[in-house]
Image (spheres, rainbow, N blue to C red):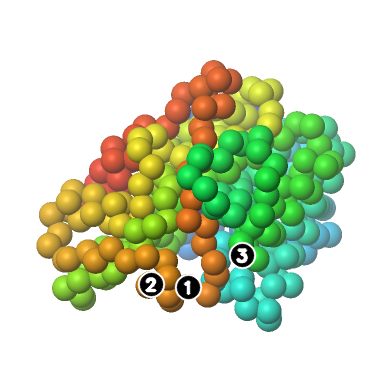
Amino acid sequence: MSKKIFVTGACGQIGVDVVNELLNRKYEVIATDLCELCDYDLLTKFNDEIMYFQLDIKNEDILRDVINKVTPDIIIHCAAWTSVDLAEFEENQELVRKINVESTKVLASCAKDLDIKIVYISTDYVFDGEGVDPWKPDCNNYNPLNFYGLTKLYGEMKITNALEKYFIVRTSWVFGKNGKNFIKTILELSKVHNEIKVINDQIGSPTYSFDLSRLIVDMIETDKYGYYHITNEGEYISWYELAKEVFFQKEISTKIIPVSTEQYGVNKAIRPLNSRLNKEKIIENGFKPLPVWKDAVSRFLKELEV
């Protein structure tokens, strides 16, 4: 009998790929999100293969009731408030906290009651980005620069303080077919502008949600719990260098102007300059790393053409 996997944020950028990977491996999937499944084209082909609950994870009682009803074997928590700049507005912060912290607390409590594993998707933004050394997954020198990062850190703590069977998966610069992301944005901008400005002093690694989801499912098939940093492999780069590669592969002639974070000056939330994540623990624990980011970008651009 296949294991039952409870996935939050199943209609999101990472969630869709996680659900598809689970179904490809013949897991029984219980998916949840705010969206109506029948309106979501990437999941419609699996309509007969998943149990879907349209629910708001901020409603703690309903969330707990659903989990107690379906009694999953594993929880993969993809749902989150991810609009980094909007999280800085005081009128949004209670909502951000409920989604990123309080709902995570409920899921941790349910996982403890059922004695099951949980995967929590987190972010490089739990760090302050000082220095140039890659952040190690077990480093606890946290100092988030923005409210989003702070709530994701508090979410991590709700998991780790309550449980032993957890995977904290920190990732960065995520792109995928579903949802908004940097690559989609610059492709759209290139259609209406002869030149665009892109930040060149924030350094990190892109992550293709398709590749990330494969490794997440690899992890739940083990008991190698703990903190992990997961991005695509390859050299660390800036947003500017990522934009250059995208335009190179797409043969787009729009000029890209490199600017500093200070010169760019549009974002309300402060971003870390050093988002380099140390991924050595992936190999140390016997997992297969993600492909290099240039290959991931190539596959993603082909996927967008379909």
The kind of residue tagged 3 is Asn
The kind of residue tagged 1 is Asn
Residue under the image location 46 percent in, 24 percent down: 288
Query: In which quarter of the view is residue 93 placed?
Result: bottom right
In the displayed structure image, the side of residue 140 where residue 284 appears, left or right:
left
Q: Where residue 263 sits: x, y (%)?
A: 37, 72
State the residue position of label 2.
264
State the residue position of label 1.
267
Relative to 35, residue 264 above or below: below
As rendered, which of 209 and 231 lies closer to the eye? 231
Rendered-image quadrant of the N terminus: top right
Q: Dot 3 surroundings within 10 Å: few (below 14), some, or many (20 or more)?
A: many
Residue under the image location 63 percent in, 78 percent down: 89
Q: Does the residue at mark 1 contact the one at mark 2 (Cβ under 8 Å)?
A: yes
SS of the residue under disc 3: loop
Query: In which quarter of the view is residue 50 placed?
Result: top right
Q: Where residue 270 sits: x, y (%)?
A: 54, 67
